[in-house]
Amino acid sequence: MKLAAKILKGDVRAAAHLITLIEDEGLTKGEGPDALKEMEILYPHTGKAYVIGVTGAPGVGKSTLTDNLIGFFRKQNMSVGVIAIDPTSALTGGALLGDRIRMQRHAADPDVFIRSLATRGWIGGLAKAAIGAVHVMDAMGKDIILVETVGSGQVEMDIVKAADTTLLVLAPGAGDEIQAMKAGILESADILAVNKADKEGAERLKADLEMMLDMKPRKTGEWQPPIVLTEAVNDTGTEKLAEALLEHQKFLKESEGLALRRRERARLELLETIESEIKEKIHGLEGGILLEQLVEDLQKGKTTPQNAAREIIKRIIK
Ligand SMILES: Nc1nc2c(ncn2[C@@H]2O[C@H](COP(=O)(O)OP(=O)(O)OP(=O)(O)O)[C@@H](O)[C@H]2O)c(=O)[nH]1
Ligand SMILES: [Mg+2]
């Protein structure tokens, strides 16, 4: 429990240590006992940070934009935490290295805490570890937490759900707009950045996106996602983008949306924890033999999924 006390005072090394515990222990058996005890102390101190999810296809400029946003928020004297997630970097670690280099400018600033998380083969654990890392940074007193995740399905959606505001980054070329539609990410985006505005096709992409957004019927008083043109390499458009983000935060606070989103987040976290704890128990029944036995029976048509499930549940309750 020594870590939590230090983290509450803003200790970066203790925070990094706990995040590593969450990352490692989360892989095998849910959060391990050490991490859980520390988190128990931290939980009551969370909920103060404003969490921004930064998502988009590979290479659109998320890290460069994030670096610019760090600069903006630091000028406002806000402390910043950054979590860079890459579900695809299990083997190479290449993209994460890129993220770190892109955010090097703030590496020496004690009010900026940057942490990368890579999957080690188990995708489901990554989103969980990321949400744990958000809680840790929140408890250590960061005002803003930026979570960068590359557009690739489930992890991305989980992060979107965990964020207060979702920033979708797109860039001309690459057919990003289609990709965004497919993943349903466009629907969840609160702010859109069309980055690489120096390149041909940026204006057209913006117009296409505007059209797509207009197709969605909106109630009066509903948030209308703004589209901001940026040139991240030149730090152009950063102020407009940051202002749009803060505007959305204000909107959420004034419309009860923030409380609703956070309630939904708590619900998801609870349900996911229940799910993983129950699954763990199932795999542990008779050392996993019962599960295998029932799988075999099911395959041979000797039982039904419902009956097999009931048998397992009966055993767990006992
Ligand atoms: N021309 C141009 N290039 C840009 C701009 N913003 C970023 N880039 C370049 O695009 C490349 C990718 O930038 P990143 O910030 O690493 O993009 P990312 O989305 O974080 O990439 P991943 O994390 O690998 O998915 C880098 O070479 C940047 O220098 C821009 O506004 N214009
Ligand atoms: Mg990146």
Image (cartoon, rainbow, N blue to C red):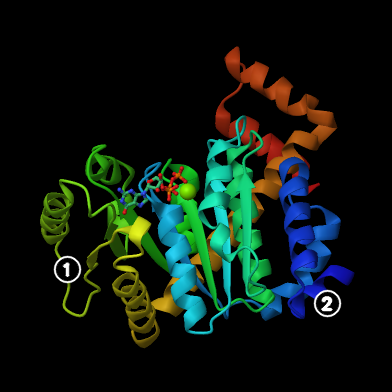
Residue at 79%, 65% in the rendered image = 13
Q: How dense is the environment of label 1, judged by Cα within 10 Å: few (below 14), some, or many (20 and up)? A: few
Task: Indicate yes or no: mark 1 CB to ligand 1 under 8 Å.
Answer: no
Mark 1 or mark 2, whichever is nearer to me: 2
**Residue 140 image offset from top left, x and y in percent:** 69, 75
At 43% from the left and 56% from the top, the residue drawn is 64
**Quarter-wise, where is residue 284 in the image?**
top right
Looking at marks 1 and 2 on the same chain, the residue that comes earlier in the sequence is marked by 2
Q: Amino acid at mark 2?
A: Ala
Q: In front here: 198 or 114?
A: 198
Q: Does residue 1 appear anywhere in the picture?
A: no
Which quadrant would the N terminus be assigned to in this image? bottom right
Give the secondary structure at mark 2.
helix
- Identify residue type, mark 1: Arg
Residue drawn where x is 29% and y is 73% of the image: 240
Q: Is residue 10 above or below residue 279?
A: below
Binning the other alpha carbons within 10 Å of mark 2 as few (below 14), some (14 to 19) or many (20 upward) gives: some
**Residue 27 horizontal side relative to residue 261, left or right:** right
Residue 216's spot in the image, x, y percent? 16, 59
Secondary structure category for the residue under label 1: loop
Pointer 1 residue: 218
Residue at left offset 56%, top offset 67%: 266
* Left or right position of 8 against 165: right
Which of the labelled discs sits on residue 5, or is there none? 2
- On the image, the x and y values in percent for residue 8 come to 75, 78
In the displayed structure image, the side of residue 295 where residue 212 appears, left or right = left
Mark 1–mark 2 Cα distance, whole angstroms, equals: 46 Å
Residue furthest bottom in the image: 254
